[in-house]
Image (tube, grey):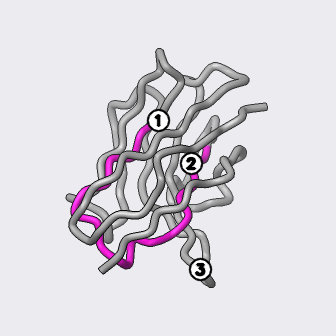
Amino acid sequence: QVQLVESGGGLVQAGGSLRLACAASGRTFSDYFMGWFRQAPGGSREFVGAINWSGSHTYYADSVKGRFTISRDNAKNTVYLQMNSLKPEDTAVYHCAAARSVNNYYYPGTYTYWGQGTRVTVSS
């Protein structure tokens, strides 16, 4: 089992920044490919970005490319999502997720473990 706990959400004005963190426990963190997803009210879970096991490769949805950055610190068992130039349409609950092996990193079903999420609200 892997337990994931997100933090860092909150209310921010458009154009502002937030840094989300996802702390993992239970298994060897570096064995897991990590993803970030978000879910807006009434919407489905949407891929935001992902990072591979070592942190050498990152992947982003077109909607956040150039604004969001994913990183990980395997020594601290934590993955981060730095969000800059936030827009009202970024408002959602953000979840991190973990997978041992990955075929399609943008597909929620790829991931075995999920955190409860942290809410991000961007005001206009």
Q: Secondary structure at mark 1?
A: strand
Is 82 colored magenta in this rendering?
Answer: yes
Q: Toward which corner of the image does residue 70 lie, by quadrant?
A: top left
Q: Amino acid at mark 3?
A: Pro
Quarter that holds the N terminus:
top right
> Is disc 2 in contact with disc 1, using a CB cutoff of under 8 Å?
yes
Residue extent of the magenta highlight: 80-97
Quarter that holds the C terminus:
bottom left
**Inter-mark Cα distance, 2 to 3:** 17 Å
Query: In the image, which is nearer the foreground, mark 3 or mark 1?
Result: 3
Residue 79: assigned label: 1
Which residue is under mark 3? 41
- The disc, 2 or 1, on the residue closer to the chain's N-terminal end is 1
Could you say where residue 67 lies in the image, as x and y percent from the top left?
24, 59
Q: Secondary structure at mark 3?
A: loop
**Inter-mark Cα distance, 3 to 1:** 24 Å
Residue 46's place in the image compared with 72, above or below, is below
From the viewer's side, name the closer residue of 32 and 123: 123
Q: Amino acid at mark 1?
A: Val
Q: Toward which corner of the image does residue 108 lie, by quadrant?
A: bottom right
Residue 96: assigned label: 2
- The reply, left or right, for residue 19 in relation to residue 106 is left
Q: Residue at x 47, y 15 (%)?
A: 75
From the viewer's side, name the closer residue of 37 and 13: 13
Q: How many C-alpha atoms fall within 10 Å of the one at disc 1: few (<14), some, or many (≥20)?
A: many
